[in-house]
Image: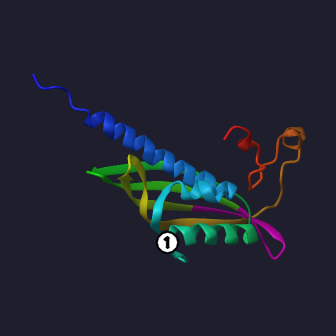
Amino acid sequence: MDAPSNEPLRELIARQQIYDALMRYCRGVDRLDREMMLSAYHPGARDNHGSFDGPVEDFVEWVIQRHRDQIISCTHLVGNVFIKFEGDVAYCESYVIGMHRLAINGVLQDMTGAARYVDRFEVRDGNWKIADRFVVFDKDRLDPVVGQWNGPLTQELLKGTRDGQDASYRYF
């Protein structure tokens, strides 16, 4: 009788590492955390976000500069994640909803965008990270903020920040 293969366990671990990298990237963008964003990629990886196409190290700086100047708050949600393995390479398509609060001509706006991250992950030294990414745009919507709830619940909640002072850094 043949010994059971460890391949299903290796794939399960790889899937979790890939998912964790996706989560680190999104959290890094939302908190403008340079190291968190970079931790999702292998050094020298490429990222093509349309108006930026180049090395991840430059991409992260581009995101931070653009967001600090234009985006008040940002939330990324990842939905469907489809992964196909070919040895030490995995191809991954992740559906993403990004919600951005910005001011245009002094008027608060909410932009919601639907896109897909199409990634090539590679395992190096036991770590699955992004080696190449391009973003596929599906749709977006821009809405003026016509009101905000200002009740007792929202007044008492901690307010999110886009830096290391955010309350979540107490634990992460």
Residue 10: percent from the left, percent from the top?
Answer: 32, 38
Q: Is residue 126 left or right of residue 75?
A: left
Q: Which residues are magenta?
A: 101-113
Disc 1 crowd, CA 10 A, few/some/many (<14, 14-19, 20+): some
- The secondary structure that dominates the magenta segment is strand
Count the labels in the image: 1
Using the image as rendered, state which of residue 26 and residue 54 is in the foreground: 54
User: What residue did someone put label 1 on?
Assistant: 55
Q: Quadrant of residue 171?
A: top right
Mark 1 element type: strand
Name the residue rendered at 84%, 43% in the picture. Answer: 154
Q: Residue furthest front?
A: 125
- Residue 58 lies, in percent from the top left, at 56, 72
Residue 76 appears in the picture as rendered = no
161 displayed left or right of 95: right
Residue at horizontal 74%, vertical 67%?
A: 68
Q: Position of residue 107 (x, y in %)?
A: 82, 70
Question: Compared with residue 6, is residue 61 higher up or lower down, i.e. above or below?
Answer: below
* Foreground pick, 42 / 25: 42
Visible in this render: residue 132? yes
Question: Which one is nearer the viewer's eye here, 103 or 16?
Answer: 16
The quadrant where residue 167 appears: top right
The residue drawn where x is 26% and y is 33% is 6
